[in-house]
Amino acid sequence: MHALNQSLPCCINSVEISNFPFWNTSFIMITSSVYLSGFRNEFHSEDPRCPGSLPTKQNNPQRCPYGLYPEQLSGTSFTSPRETNSRSWLYRIRPSVLHTPFKKLPLGNLSTNWDIFEPNPNQLKWDPFDIPDVEDRRVDFVQGLNTVCGAGDPKDRHGIAIHMFLCNTSMEDKCFYNSDGDFLIVPQQGKLWITTEFGKMLVEPNEICVIQQGMRFSVELKGPTRGYILEVYNNHFVLPPLGPIGANGLANPRGFLTPVAWYEDKEVNKYTVINKFQGHLFAACQNHSPFDVVAWHGNYVPYKYNLSDFMVFNTVSFDHADPSIFTVLTCPSTRPGVAIADFVIFPPRWSTAENTFRPPYYHRNCMSEFMGLIYGSYEAKEDTLKPGGATLHNIMTPHGPDSNCFEKASNAQLVPEKVAEETMSFMFESCLNMTVTDWACNTSLKLDVNYPKCWQNLKKMFNPKLMSLKPNINGEAYTSIYRSPIHAEDNDVGNADTAVHN
């Protein structure tokens, strides 16, 4: 098996796959690993059916092994610094240029023209978006793309868009690629069997995958499927800097997995290639499968990541840490420390903060925050946000825990506890001011107009005669200046005044 890839771990076992439509039966699956491990590594891979198909010592020989065509896929400019330069060389049966001219397709519910929608500064929440019933209409991954919100312009290579994918049917003799930017895909219901030019990936809920700009892929489904997509136009996703954390933690590079080379030599009558270009969809036809890459090498690749591999950091003393400590991937802007987009998760973790309100604090932010829930319940809005739904709190829109969460957390006994068990929520955060589409506000019929009511029961608790309360060793409350016990029944001004002066 050494011909598959020298980066694979030792002591692997192989089995022939049968009765599994995702894998061609002639492909050998590695039971302990079908992926290459690492983030932005220099990988090389070849399909084991064609040993020696990867040229050695040079990228572009006069004649490639097996009569293959060499083709470079560039993710950055040729002259980008070495530390950021991204490209891969593909060795394929036919070059990707072999197709008919592109013709424009209807956009459906995709959008990038934000000026046609009214601005909305309110707190917004959506109930779980409906997946079309396959008995009513068959919807594949591309047909099921629906834009929720976004900002910027793909023509200027600046901005983001957030989409929901709601689909029930596999893509048949069809592939898709995005000329505008990268897709970060977060499945919430159903598995995605994704075929790419680099190989195959299985992506399940609690995993994510990134298909970078220009990479062709097709999605096979088994039943109703739903999820979220963060699209970035500016740049590519990178791991956030660790700073004082040190060398290890958060999303470790070895947790990112890239597929191994796999090809199909398949003649097809009118195979459809769909291209998202300047916010519009175009289709071209060709008479063969685009997944005919026999070997490849480089560092510009698709990849996936299991969110349970995230190494969480949190406070072990007091106060609630900022959510930046939960950043998995970031797309930096040109301003230091400011992201075009961050992908942040809120996984199961221990909470131990002393004398601290532990859920997320009330907040107004210079960044826009889009929340989604993969499974379970979000700690700050247990009764509000549901799996497959979402919230959006735009730039400087106030938000925070609902009244039930505030009441519960304000009176909880502060002992070490595991929070967010059986839960995975996430946030797409951006420095850009988001515009919400008509599909999200009206057509989807999922906008919860009663969402702002979740804060309306927050009570006024101000008492000018009391300092902040702090528990003593007996569990009683006392004022921070006079240190006199104040009991729960001393909650009117007269009783509180007596408690202070006694």
Image (cartoon, rainbow, N blue to C red):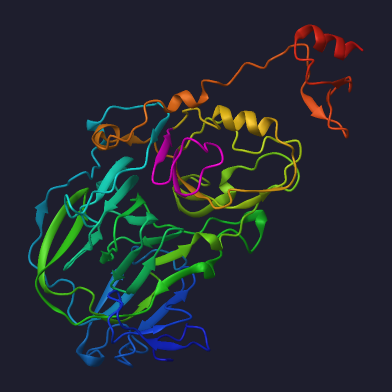
Q: Look at 67% across and 17% down and name the residue there.
A: 461
Quarter of the rendering occupied by the N terminus: bottom left
Left or right, residue 3 beside residue 280: right
Percent of width and height locating residue 467? 78, 19
Q: Look at 52% across and 38% down and name the residue there.
A: 382
Quarter of the rendering occupied by the C terminus: top right
Percent of width and height locating residue 64? 24, 89
**Range of residues picked out in magenta:** 369-394
Q: Look at 52% across and 42% down and name the residue there.
A: 378
Percent of width and height locating residue 192? 33, 63
Residue 25: quarter of image: bottom left
* Residue 318 visible in this rendered orientation of the protein: yes
**Residue 392 inside the magenta-drawn segment:** yes
- Residue 500 drawn above or below residue 309: above
Left or right, residue 239 beside residue 387: right
Left or right, residue 430 beside residue 255: left
Q: Look at 53% across and 46% down and name the residue there.
A: 337
Task: Name the one closer to the observer, 68 or 288.
Answer: 288
Percent of width and height locating residue 393? 44, 33
Task: Name the one closer to the observer, 166 or 195.
Answer: 166
